[in-house]
Image (cartoon, rainbow, N blue to C red):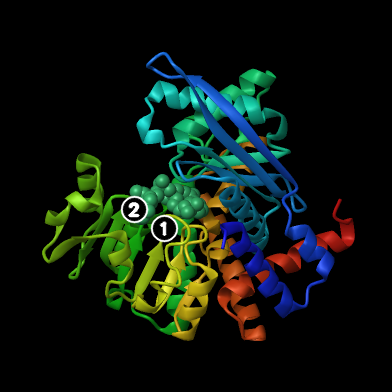
Amino acid sequence: MSLFENTLKQINEAAEIMNLEKDIITILSHPKRIMQVSLPIRMDSGEIKVFEGFRVQHNDLAGPFKGGIRYHEQVDMDEVKALAAWMTMKCAVVGIPLGGAKGGIVVDPKKLSKRELEQLTRRYVDRIQAIIGPDKDVPAPDVNTNGQIMAWIVDEFMKLGNLNKKGVVTGKPIECGGSAGRDEATAQGGVYVIDEIVVEKGIKPEEMRVVIQGFGNAGGTMAMLLAEKGYKICGVSDSKGGLYCADGLDPKQVNACKEEKGSVTECKMVASNCEVCTNEELLEKDCDILILAALENQVHADNAANVKAKMIFELANGPTTPEADKILSGKGVMIVPDILFNAGGVTVSYFELVQNETQYYWTASKVQRRLKPIMVNAWQRVSGIQKKYNCTLRQAAFISAMTRLKAIMEQRGFE
Ligand code: NAD
C-alpha cells in the first residue's frame, strides 16, 4: 500500500468511528494543490543536472499551509502527499491556526557540495515562490534540511519579491529571524506528553529502558532530554545502523563520537556491553520504550510482532504501518501517534511565524512555557477521546483533528 493510501486509511477509520459526513472525508482525501518542478543546476563538474521537486498543499482551512521540505533520494509525490495530509491533521490536533503542506526534492544532499546545495535550494524557491509566503504557505526543515537551508530560502524569497517577509519559512537560524527553542521543540513537545503519561501510569523514569531509532535533530535531542530526566537510553541509530548498549549509554558522548566519526555505529566504545546492529535489529531489541525518529514505514507487518517495547512514541511521521498498528494494538502496546507526539515542532514554528510578523522575539523559556500547555491540552483531549470511543490513540488523534476541521467547514464551507 502506498503511504498516501495509509493516510487515507487512517482518515477513514477515524471518520467511521466518529460518524463523520462523507463530504468532509472526500475533501480531506484530496490535496488542494500539487506542484511538481524541474530544478536545473550547474554542478561543480561544469555539467547541468536537473533535479525533481514537489510541493503539496493539502488543506488551508485553519490557516496558511505549513510543512517541511525533505531532501532525500526516495522522496516521491505519494510520500509528499501523505506527509502534507498528516500536517493538516497535526496542526488541527494541537489547535494552531495553520493548515498542512509538505515539500521535497529527490536528492541525496550528502553527494552535493555546499555551493550545489545552495543553488538547488535557491532554484526550488524560484520555482515555488508564487505559492509560498507567510500568508500562503510556510515551509520548514525536515529530513536532511536545516537552518542553513532555511536561511537560503528566506534570502532568495525576499530577493525575488523585493520583500521583507522572514515568515516565509520557519526553522531559521536565530540570526535570520528564527525562534529560540525551535531546534529542541519537536523532542521537547514529545517529552511534555511523556511526562503526562508517566504520571498517569505511575511509571518511574529510571526503570525505563529506551531505544531511539534515528539520532538526528528530533531523535538526538529526545535522547538527551530523556537521559537528563533519568531514563536509561539503551539504543540509538542512524542511516548506517544501530548501537545497542544493554547497560545504557550517554547520548552526549554518542553525539560527540558521531560528530567525529560520522555514525553511531563507530561508537561502540562509549559504554560497556555495546554492540553494533542493523536498524531492523535495533527495533526488536529489549526495551520498555521505543522512539521512532527516522523515516516512515519502519514498523510493519513483518517485524511488528517482534517489537518488545510496551510503549512506542512516534517522533517521525508515519513510522508505523496500519498493519503493524493492528498487530501492536493486539499485543497491548501503547502507540502515541506522530500527529500528536511530534507536534511540538510545528507549534514552535507557529510561534516563530508570530514573532516574525510582530517583530518581537521571545526567550527560550517563554517558548517552552507556551509550548507546554498546548501539548498537554492536546494530549488530554486525545486521551479523553480514546477513552470515550474505546479506540486507539491514533484514531483518537485523527478524531480530535477532524472534529476541529469539521467545525470550520460547517461554518465556512470548504471552497
Ligand atoms: P534528521 O535528518 O535530523 O534525522 C534523521 C535521522 O534518521 C538521522 O540520524 C538519519 O541518519 C536517520 N536515518 C535516516 N535513514 C534511516 C534509516 N533508514 N533507518 C534509521 N535511521 C535512519 O531529521 P529529523 O528532523 O530529526 O526528522 C526525523 C523524523 O522526524 C522525520 O520523519 C521527520 O518528518 C520527523 N519530524 C521532524 C521534526 C523536526 O522538527 N525536526 C518535526 C516533526 C517531525
Tell whether 381 sits left or right of 320.
right
Q: Position of residue 245 (x, y in %)?
A: 19, 65
Query: Ligand 1: does it lie within 8 Å of the C-beta at label 2?
Result: yes
Extreme-top residue of the structure: 46
Residue beneath the point at 45% across and 58% down: 188
Q: Is the residue 310 above or below the residue 216 in the image?
A: below
Query: Ligand 1: does it lie within 8 Å of the C-beta at label 1?
Result: yes
Residue 203 appears in the picture as rendered: yes
The secondary element bearing badge 1 is classed as loop
- Label 2 or label 1, whichever comes before in sequence order: 2
Could you tell me if the residues under marks 2 and 1 are in contact, i.e. CB atoms within 8 Å?
yes
Q: Is the residue 302 above or below the residue 369 in the image?
A: below
Q: Where is residue 262 in the image (x, y as percent from the top left)?
A: 24, 42
Residue beneath the point at 65% across and 60% down: 89
Could you say which is closer to the camera, residue 363 or residue 306?
306
Q: Distance between the residues labelled 2 and 1?
A: 7 Å
Disc number placed over residue 293 in the picture, else none: 1
Neighbour tally class for label 2: few under 14, some 14-19, many 20 plus, Cα within 10 Å: many
The secondary element bearing badge 2 is classed as loop
Disc number placed over residue 215 in the picture, else none: 2
Q: Which amino acid does label 2 sit on?
A: Phe
Q: What residue type is labelled 1?
A: Ala
Residue 216 appears in the picture as rendered: no
Tell whether 159 sits left or right of 341.
right
